[in-house]
Image: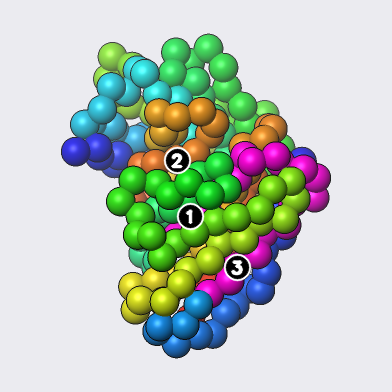
Amino acid sequence: EIVLTQSPATLSLSPGERATLSCRASQSVSVSLGWYQQKPGQAPRLLIYDVSNRATGIPARFSGSGSGTDFTLTISNLEPEDFAVYYCQHHYSWPLTFGGGTKVEI
Amino acid sequence: EVQLVESGGGLVQPGGSLRLSCAASGFTFSSHAMNWVRLAPGKGLEWVSHISDSAGNTVYADSVKARFTISRDNSKNTLYLQMNSLRAEDTAIYYCAKEWDGSGEYFDYWGQGTLVTVSS
């Protein structure tokens, strides 16, 4: 099983700042990695697929980068609605796994 | 508009069983693989199970293998999860999730979830 480790667990920032979230895989997942956002009481939402491609309707302030084992989600110019929990997920092999999440809080 | 509506959650004793359902609409259900993903209290998302569009292939997380069974009825646009031998650690919100149209297992639509509580 590929383990995805996200850091930091919590990120305390203010609106307008930049958020940098990390996801490290226990072995290479090539570019088979995506990111989701989840707000309390809501279902997750797909943000990024294949490392750096924004899903439909996702604002340009969300960007992804990386390859192999180290990946980054960057949220530039945080908006109030961006404060949420973010998860990375791979589909390189079965079983699919998610990272433990990073909470972006004010 | 794509809609996924889960049902069947509730309180069950350890060792008991439950069957979750997910009613799908707004897309061609029979053309998409589907999954169950859960969110336990204080924990992160955990993928549970996958079923291919034709139900010819199913995959399970080790934590539920041999206890849970995923199935689908394409004539009813409905996804199921039969959960047996339930344990306290199965307590979670269970989401059904649709795989997207592209390559790879990403989930572009999710239901609002159904809560399963395993407790005596």
Q: Is residue B22 magenta?
A: no
Q: Secondary structure at mark 3?
A: strand
**Is B95 in front, or is A45?**
A45
Q: Which residue is mark 3?
A: A21
Q: Position of residue A47 (x, y in %)?
A: 44, 53
Q: Is residue A99 visible?
A: no
Q: Which tag is nearer the camera, tag 3 or tag 2?
A: 3
| Above or below: residue A105 compared with residue B86 | below
Q: Which tag is nearer the camera, tag 1 or tag 3?
A: 3
User: Which quadrant is home to the C terminus of chain B?
Assistant: bottom right
Q: Are marks 1 and 2 in contact (CB under 8 Å)?
A: yes
Please give the count of numbered marks on the rendered protein: 3
Q: Which residue is mark 2?
A: B107
Cα–Cα span, label 1 and label 3 = 12 Å
The label shown at residue B84 is none
Q: Which residue is mark 1?
A: A36
- Colour convention: rainbow
The residue under label 1 is which amino acid type?
A: Tyr
Quadrant for residue B62, please give it.
top right
Q: Main secondary structure of the magenta part?
A: strand
